[in-house]
């Protein structure tokens, strides 16, 4: 290493320069004074320093063990002493390091920190952290392991801690921070209509629903939030779709109570049905009240039943038929052809399997779900007619449903030309989910749109959505006639076999770009029950979603 000289400390600022040698004294456990040599002199690690015209010497080359240990010890000692600025100064990003280290005490409320370095491995130094998290008189211990890496600064040659948020805690990404406080909204316990607790252990697909109930009712259901130490994600982590993470729970919250309209027997049956069919979802509602009796999804990660946005295929023909009946364009028993091909605005539309009905009633075309019997009405319609019908009679596409948890309320945009024609058969820009289509069947059964709901509006005095008008009794009678025919003799007959009483149904198959099989849809009612389901990429609705819906209607 060469000659080493001790130099008495006489400077006020900056190191003393004596005979071309800079003497630096670094405080740290078991560490003495170390000399950094310039003017091309060899250091103990074999690296050299470059000389500039102003005698500023920048050291280069690999870090020595001493340099790594010194930088690490200085950083950890300053952090332990609560000197965030001094610790940050030993990093290559003082601003970011200073902010996070300051927040470690101020925002995370971590005190009494003990930092114990482990055995160095090259330029990396592991260390353990012990401290106390204290918030509003509540405290608990915190223990975890982390590590830091020392690098040589290219401009100054100094050994510095390579700054990343993970140095402070391994679960932190750059831009994240640690925060201790109340854990958002208080927890809730949700119950079915009979007083049984709803849990994901009992009903696996209810996870998103229970999360939604906490978000909506946590603050008004009588609960109290717990205290947690959390990783709060920054912009970069949010962009990467990382969620906040709880690292430590100081106190668990006291849950409030929310009662839902779910029927335990229907919910259990719905869970069994979707568990047996990939990518399936189903909803059951009571037409006379709008109460949601069951909701289930095969994939519990996303609530397709309430929040899905999918083309509903031919189940949309229920709404289209309502419009045609109200406009006096057709009656159920009126002769109406369904050609094999129909051209509209440059598009050629085909029926399923290139079928056709040369002579037959509209009811027959509805029961067979013959597409061109609907699309060939397009020249007689305004671009906005279907949108108006969906909004005014069925309450769809208004984005104003308030069922108690987040929902997608359907979309029937105004379209023109071929896209308008496609909308008549539930393609184009039309988007729905099982909740929307169960509501459609419920509206047909009762003659009145009643917004579905999961939690009674009496709980929070919210206003339920209403339709601006009601279909005529004649229109309702015709709709029930064509849906009853479909359930008994049409594309829904196989699935609805054995479902007795006042019944009606409609099947649907929605083509999706890049998907080999269509999404299968089915919506139906039986007395004071209505249900709808979808099986994504499943095939024809009568064969896929139909049995799921029919099994639930049989329970009524």
Image: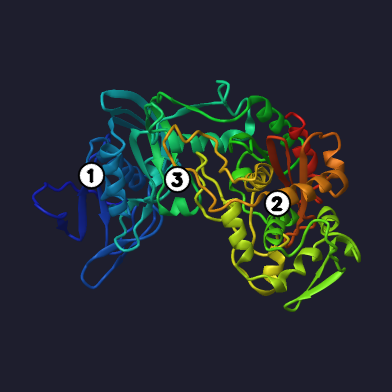
Taking the spot 45% from the left edge, 50% from the top edge, the residue there is 237
55 vs 512, left or right, is left
Give the vertical position of 108 relative to 398 (above or below): above
Instruction: Tell us which disc is closer to us: 2 or 1.
Output: 2
Give the vertical position of 486 relative to 135 (above or below): below
Q: Position of residue 21 (x, y in %)?
A: 21, 57
Kindly identify which numbered label has been placed on residue 300. none
Instruction: Tell us which disc is closer to us: 2 or 3.
Output: 2
Distance from Cα at disc 2 to Cα at disc 1: 93 Å
Camera sees residue 538? no
Distance from Cα at disc 1 to Cα at disc 3: 21 Å
Q: Pointer 1 and pointer 3: residues touching (CB < 8 Å)?
A: no
**Quadrant of the drawing holding the C terminus:** top right
Q: Position of residue 365 (x, y in %)?
A: 84, 58
Quick one: label 2 or label 3, which is nearer the N terminus? Answer: 3
Q: Nearer the viewer, residue 533 or 74?
A: 533
Give the vertical position of 276 relative to 166 (above or below): above
Q: Nearer the viewer, residue 209 or 290?
A: 290
Q: Residues within 10 Å of mark 3 (few under 14, many from 20)?
A: few
Q: Position of residue 259 (x, y in %)?
A: 51, 27
Quick one: label 2 or label 1, which is nearer the N terminus? Answer: 1
Q: Position of residue 242 (x, y in %)?
A: 49, 47
Residue named by callout 1: 26
Circle 3 SS class: loop
Taking the spot 26% from the left edge, 45% from the top edge, the residue there is 87
361 vs 131, left or right, is right
Circle 2 SS class: helix
Kindly identify which numbered label has been placed on residue 122. 3
Quick one: label 1 or label 3, which is nearer the N terminus? Answer: 1
Circle 1 SS class: loop
Q: Residues within 10 Å of mark 2 (few under 14, many from 20)?
A: few
Residue named by callout 2: 474
């Amino acid at each position: 290493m060469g000659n080493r000289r001790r130099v008495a400390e006489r400077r006020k600022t900056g190191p003393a320069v004596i005979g071309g040698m800079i003497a630096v004294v670094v405080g740290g456990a078991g560490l003495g004074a170390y000399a950094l040599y310039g003017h091309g002199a060899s250091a103990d690690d074999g690296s050299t320093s470059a000389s500039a015209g102003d005698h500023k010497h920048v050291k280069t080359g690999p870090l020595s063990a001493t340099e790594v240990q010194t930088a690490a010890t200085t950083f950890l000692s300053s952090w332990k002493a609560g000197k965030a600025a001094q610790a940050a100064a030993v990093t290559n990003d003082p601003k970011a390091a200073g902010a996070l280290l300051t927040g470690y005490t101020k925002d995370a409320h971590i005190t009494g920190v003990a930092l114990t370095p482990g055995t160095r491995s090259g330029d990396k130094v592991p260390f353990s952290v012990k401290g106390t998290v204290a918030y509003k008189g509540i405290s608990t211990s915190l223990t975890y392991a982390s590590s830091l890496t020392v690098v040589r600064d290219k401009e100054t040659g100094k050994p510095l801690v390579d700054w990343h948020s993970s140095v402070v805690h391994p679960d932190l990404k750059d831009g994240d921070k640690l925060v201790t406080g109340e854990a958002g909204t208080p927890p809730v316990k949700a119950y079915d209509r009979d007083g049984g607790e709803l849990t994901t252990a009992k009903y696996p697909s209810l996870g998103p629903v229970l999360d939604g109930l906490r978000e909506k009712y946590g603050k008004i259901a009588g609960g109290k939030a717990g205290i947690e130490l959390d990783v709060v994600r920054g912009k970069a982590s949010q962009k990467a779709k990382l969620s906040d993470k709880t690292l430590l729970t100081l106190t668990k919250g006291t849950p409030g109570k929310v009662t839902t309209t779910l029927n335990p027997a229907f919910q259990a049956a719905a869970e069994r049905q979707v568990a047996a069919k990939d990518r399936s979802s189903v909803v059951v509602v009571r037409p006379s009240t709008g109460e949601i009796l069951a909701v289930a999804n095969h994939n519990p990660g996303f609530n397709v039943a309430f929040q899905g946005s999918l083309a509903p295929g031919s189940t949309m023909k229920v709404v289209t038929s309502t419009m045609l009946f109200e406009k006096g364009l057709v009656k159920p028993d009126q002769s109406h052809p369904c050609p094999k091909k129909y051209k509209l605005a440059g598009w050629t539309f085909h029926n399923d399997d290139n079928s056709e009905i040369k002579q037959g009633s509209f009811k027959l075309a509805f029961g067979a779900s013959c597409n061109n019997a609907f699309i060939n009405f397009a020249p007689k319609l305004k671009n906005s007619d279907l949108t108006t019908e969906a909004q005014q009679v069925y309450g769809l596409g208004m984005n104003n449903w308030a069922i108690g948890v987040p929902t997608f309320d359907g979309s029937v945009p105004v379209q023109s030309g071929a896209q308008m024609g496609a909308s008549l058969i539930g393609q184009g820009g039309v988007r729905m989910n099982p909740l929307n289509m169960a509501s459609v069947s419920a509206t047909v059964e009762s003659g009145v749109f009643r917004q579905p709901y999961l939690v009674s509006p009496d709980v929070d005095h919210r206003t339920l959505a209403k339709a601006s008008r009601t279909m005529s009794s004649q229109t309702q009678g015709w709709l029930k006639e064509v849906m009853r025919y479909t359930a008994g003799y049409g594309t829904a007959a196989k699935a609805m076999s054995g479902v007795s009483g006042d019944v009606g149904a409609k099947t649907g198959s929605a083509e999706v770009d890049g998907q080999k099989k269509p999404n299968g849809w089915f919506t139906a009612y039986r007395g004071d029950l209505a249900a709808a389901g979808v099986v994504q990429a499943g095939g024809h609705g009568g064969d896929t979603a139909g049995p799921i819906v029919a099994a639930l209607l049989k329970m009524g």
